[in-house]
Amino acid sequence: MTELTKLSAAEIAGLVAAGETSAVEVTRAHLDRIAAVDDRVHAFLHVDSDGALAAARDVDARRAAGEELGPLAGVPVAVKDVLTTKGVPTTVGSKILEGWRPPYDSTIVQRLRAAGTVMLGKTNMDEFAMGSSTEYSAYGPTRNPWDTDRIPGGSGGGSAAALAAYEAPLAIGSDTGGSIRQPGAVTGTVGAKPTYGGTSRYGLVAFSSSLDTPGPCARTVLDAALLHEAIGGHDPRDSTSIPAPVPDVVAAAKRGATGDLTGVRLGVVSEFADEGVEPGVLAAFNESVDALTKLGAEIVEVSCPHFRYALPAYYLIAPSECSSNLARFDGVRFGLRVGDDGNRSLEEVMSVTREAGFGPEVKRRIMIGTYALSSGYYDAYYGQAQKVRTLITRDFTAAFERVDALISPTTPFVAFPLGARTSDPYQMYLADLFTSPTNLYGGPGISVPCGLSGGLPVGLQVMAPTMADDRMYRVAAALETAVGTLTPPEL
Ligand code: GLN
């Protein structure tokens, strides 16, 4: 049998269901792999070996008792440290929550447990999910398994790197401006941002509540769809959760895997070509467009004139919401408290705690957001950004009257060297150029590997109308049949 860690989630689940391996054996193989490589990758902030083995034993016992198990039973999963896990440390990559063990599980984690998946641990991320390289983690960067001197993307670099390093076959991410899709692109893995409201935010530590969307990360499109189905759907504990069933993403991925896209109209956003895409990324994208044509898709050029304002609008709306959301970290209710020596006022303790607990990027966002919301500037910044958000949504709506889905490169550039963009925030923000429009609109987007540039992975993004998540899985799975999965060099 091939090494268990190299198998897809669907393959692992099949072997477990057939009794050809056990959940415990699969879990041990992944824990061993983590022990062997994670000192070089640093995908994990916390490995929960005991919890994972206990969950795996439970799955094996239920199977032995003849219980009917779900399609992912016994499959290990790594969870981004932005989701609360009962009794298991949850830091959001920040010192301000160091040592916090939440008293409850997020809905996503509850559903992962109910599906019989085995949580291996919590993955590294940019502090509070703000960043595109995982270098803003307070616990040190994650490295890209394709080249450990390069970034794995962000903010969910830990989840993507865990997949590319074969430490986990499945992972959970969260996407506010691209944090599932961009790490997927630069690590040669698959990352899907569901329709906003299609996956529950209950227990997702909030960054920008009108944009935050948890979602699946995997090495294959089918695995991402299986995970999406397991975690998605209505949650009464999230007031923005959509009261509708998950679109049939698994069937769509299987349909796409037949490699037939006859009758599917795909739009290429014409304005994206002028946006400073690296030549190697553009070449891989153009080859994929040819491949999609060969699979039967019709390619149409579509103008979305307001997409070029997505980045500035995103970098006002997200910080504005963050400045409000992060007010709850006050040294009183959760995690870190500094300077409480009996001589300081409550306000001083809050101030000293926030000064010590937040990193520079988080502070920058809080300051930008507070400024954008301040009286006198509100209309000029936050209000204007909201108007741009409406115009972007109209661009999407108009485009989807002409085409079934839009395609673009996921990111303008491949994985860059560690340190290359940390001194210039704007250079870091450019990573979100092609992913942020989707968040402002609220629709689904997926990144699927589409080739290499200079030996590094390139991702293609498929964007679909809200609640048409199935469509993007069909297109992504079809492209996967043409391109294949990308295999990184041995670590
Ligand atoms: N790179 C973006 C940011 O820094 C996206 C973050 C995200 O999707 N969580 O805000």
Image (cartoon, rainbow, N blue to C red):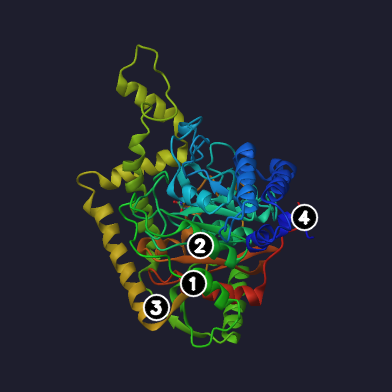
Mark 4 neighbour density, 10 Å: few (under 14) some (14–19) many (20 or more): few
Q: Secondary structure at mark 4?
A: loop
Foreground pick, 380 / 9: 9
Q: Residue furthest front?
A: 65
Residue type, numbered disc 3: Ser
- The answer to whether the residue labelled 1 contacts the one labelled 3, judged by CB atoms less than 8 Å apart, is no
Sequence order check: which comes first, mark 1 or mark 2?
Answer: 2
Farthest residue, direction right = 1
Secondary structure under the numbered disc 2 in the rendered image: strand
Q: Position of residue 438 (x, y in %)?
A: 41, 64
- Pointer 3 residue: 303
- Contact check, label 4 and label 2, Cβ < 8 Å: no
> Can you tell which of label 2 and label 3 is closer to the viewer?
2
Exactly how many numbered labels are in the figure?
4
Mark with earlier residue (3, 4): 3
Q: Tell me the residue that label 2 is attached to.
A: 192
Secondary structure at numbered mark 3: loop
As drawn, the label of residue 472 is: 1
Q: 66 or 458: nearer the eye? A: 66
Image position of 335 (left or right of 154): left
Neighbours of disc 1 within 10 Å: few (<14), some (14-19), many (20+): many
Determine which residue is flagged by label 4. Answer: 490
Q: Secondary structure at mark 1?
A: helix
N-terminal of the pair, mark 4 or mark 2, is: 2
Would residue 417 be found to the left or right of residue 347 on screen?
right
Amino acid type of disc 4? Answer: Glu
Instruction: Assess whether mark 4 and mark 3 are in contact (beta carbons under 8 angstroms).
Output: no
**Rendered position, 382 above or below 368:** below
- Gap in angstroms between the C-alphas marked 1 and 4: 31 Å
Report if the CB atoms under discs 1 and 4 are less than 8 Å apart: no
Residue labelled 2 has its Cβ within 8 Å of some atom of ligand 1: no
